[in-house]
Amino acid sequence: MGYTLVYLSLIVLIPLATLVVKTAELSPGELWALATSRRAIASYQVTFGASLVAALVNAAFGTAIAWALVRYRFPGRALVDAIVDVPFALPTAVSGLALTAVFAPTGWIGRWLAPLGIQAVFTPLGITLALIFIGLPFVVRTVQPVLEDLEAEVEEAAAVLGATRWQTLTRIIVPALTPALLTGFALAFARAIGEYGSVVFISGNKQFETEITPLLIMTRLEQFDYAGATALALVMLIVSFAMLLAINGLGAWARRRAGHA
Amino acid sequence: MGAPARGARMMETRGIAAPLAAAATDEPAWVRRIVIAVAIAFVGAFVLVPLAAVFAEAFKAGLAAYGRAITDPAALSAVKLTFLAAAIAVPLNVVFGIAASWAIARFRFPGRSILTALIDLPLAVSPVIAGMVFVLLFGKQGLIGPWLTGHGIQVIFALPGIVLATTFVTFPFVARELIPVMEAQGAEEEEAAIVLGATGWQTFLRITLPKIKWGLLFGVVLCTARAMGEFGAVSVVSGHIRGRTNTLPLHVEILYNEYEYQAAFAVASLLVVLALASLVARRIIGRRVEAT
Amino acid sequence: MKRLLPALLVVAAACSKEPAGAGKDARDIALLNVSYDPTRELYTAVNAAFARDWEARTGQRVTIEQSHGGSAKQARAVIDGLEADVVTLGLAYDVDAIARTGLIDADWATRLPAHAAPFTSTIVFLVRKGNPRAIRDWDDLVRPGISVITPNPKTSGGARWNYLAAWGYALRRGGDAQARRFVAQLYRNVPVLDSGARGATTTFVERGIGDVLIAWESEALLALDKLGKDKVELVVPSVSIRAEPPVAVVDRNVDRRGTREVATAYLQFLYSPEGQGLAAQSFYRPRDPANQPAGFPAIQLFTIDDLGGWSRAQPMHFADGGVFDQITAK
């Protein structure tokens, strides 16, 4: 117990507290000004906007993938099931490098997009693509087990009682999946807002347009602007912690739902 | 993130739905095909194609060039440093993970839920911030950096800084895997052992460890994979000294910046192989976790 | 268990406490050169040549370790404790930033010849093969529809020279107001701001983005050499800036590590005929008038001092809220 606390303090709490101590050197007014500068606000918009879109795309496609994996048998199913975890296991720098190579106008997928006038790399679209990549396993792997545990009897009962497939889907399956779906969405979103490694390779890193907050923190650091960096880091830290509490709350809700069902 | 373990289990018992109910328990064939096609296309475009691209670029200039790239002294020293950092960070987090999950699963104490949330915190903190806090703490302009420098101890831009940053980002993995395992397993057998006169250490080795070993191993695999692949946090504290403080992911970036694209992808392919190996290990161990 | 963590940290600390120079022979010595992005090839060659030279003169074996990155980022690392013996950065402002913390003595720029910049370069353009957008001079970069690639001057030292070259060109055509309009138009044509010079070159050449890359002459010639003349070609503007990347011994670090003598010799080696020749091979313009190889295009050059020096240019253009922030803000 004592060990747990000492180690937690040494590795996590003291370093993070340093951040708070550093920001305490600023007056609240200065802190507010730094955290809400136009460039910072623009970077929040890019970060949270792209993360939100990516998490939504993952929620939709991740659920479809989980559904296909659990309910259907098709050639290549085992392979799809296995490689869904790749984005989680792959170092982010490699992910960024690989995605840039593929989606660049000279890349395997980018060359089909370029004639359509779609430029993926170095645009907000590129950031979103990278965030979709890294967030994919979170939705699939939270929805999948819940789908597996859904009891076929309930659906059969609904069918016997005369429900159409659409009714069964909207009245039985969707409500049962909602907590897991929300948790997966929140996990993907939380992961996306902090992502750095894969995004810097594929993003244009242009202020007000394609500059994500972690990159702005890095930029501030490189300009010897520690106050600016810590102010932004504090904002990110608070958001991260709030996301964590939300995810844990969702988890508790999901368990309660499961208990009642 | 414990979810992938459960993903290994498939519901083989399904599909015995009564034929009369088929209309309401199954989708029309065209829906089925579309969903399957979407799943394959999405995973293919986002995961399979980028992976293939890494290998295609890595072998573009032939096998010999690939061999040269991964046996270059700077690449080898990056491999060594990467494994060394993981070899220190992972055991630290294993010991912590066991202690923390024990405390959380076995005891009710004030602040228990806060502790659980704090363990997860490194997962949610941006890696850049993770690196930055260590610079703020141990850097020359940092809080205790000047004191350390005075005693000839270099933390940032040296191995200890890389180890600390790695430990920080991989902090939650073992604990997160073990907490549910320990909670599910209950304390009765341990209590029985203590009553029968076993010491705490004996109880741990004979009763607890055998029961948690697969969960533990699973956590170790996750932790190791992440430790070897971390980029953002390590990049901030590394100093990028070629042959000394470059880990594999950082070496990839450096080669890329030297127009050595083929070499960059060759080294990246090593990391892909490590990642795939960790996935295979996870699936095998995941099945054992299910079995126990 | 409790003792394990401190023990491991001590072991880790001990590993790194071992002086960098420790080797088989107690007389072996190691230097750390913290440099900016586009000097990788240059210092690979210089380090090998200097090691040979030093061993021949003193019998001592020296290995030089390299760290590369954006100039400002590298300066920050040194300020935060990266134990550089020498810094070889993209612009004097970054060395001054280190000097302000006391790590380098304030008179560093006068301790070596030619403002402590052993070689120079200038800013030129790379365009696609055949120059399809007909780019000849600075004015062509602000034409509507031209896509210009240049890194972010807030993070890249090299990019500040790019920016100031454009500024200086426009300044010669009119006053501050005209220059401001010119760079504003120029940066409106920039779709990607990479954080470093190398990233920008990769974006342009490898990823095929943009019509023109503003680059250091050394970087442009190297890209032509390494990536093929079939993809891109060089365009030399009518006027450009003389880029002077400075070098300095990090006084406090060499005094503690006892490496001042070899570190100073290392920097002086850059001024030797051999060092100047290697600079020329890496497409930098040597200082030595007797050692001017053919192949460098003739350009009319102005210097940073014509723009008031770094002490004026840096806060005016690149500080938060400075001209660059104003022109890129929407």
Image (cartoon, helix red, strand yellow):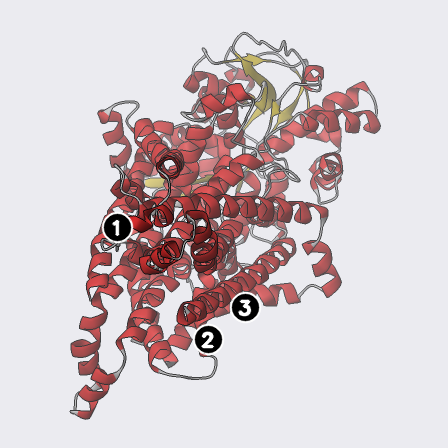
Front residue (pair B220, B106): B106
Task: Tell me the crowding category of disc 1: few under 14, some 14 to 19, or many 20 or more residues within 10 angstroms, Cα based.
Answer: some
State the quadrant of the N terminus of chain C.
bottom left
**Both marks 3 and 1 on one chain:** no
Q: At which x and y percent is residue C314?
A: 70, 39
Q: Distance between the residues labelled 3 and 1?
A: 54 Å
Q: Mark 3 lies on which chain?
A: A
Q: Which chain carries label 2?
A: B
Q: Residue shown at 27%/35% (left/top)? A: B70
* Residue indicated by mark 1: B15
Locate residue B113 relative to residue B77 in the image: left or right.
right
For discs 3 and 2, the disc positioned in front in the rendered view = 2
Front residue (pair A128, B151): A128
| Three-letter residue code for mark 2 | Ser
Q: What element carries label 1?
A: loop
Q: How far apart are marks 3 and 2 (CA)?
A: 20 Å
Locate residue A247 relative to residue C179 in the image: left or right.
left
| Three-letter residue code for mark 1 | Gly
Q: Residue shown at 30%/23% (left/top)? A: B60
Q: What element carries label 2?
A: helix
Q: Residue shown at 54%/23% (left/top)? A: C209
Front residue (pair B113, B56): B113
In the drawing, what numbered circle is on residue A17? 3
State the quadrant of the C terminus of chain C.
top right
| Three-letter residue code for mark 3 | Ala
Front residue (pair C123, B185): B185
In the drawing, what numbered circle is on residue B113? 2
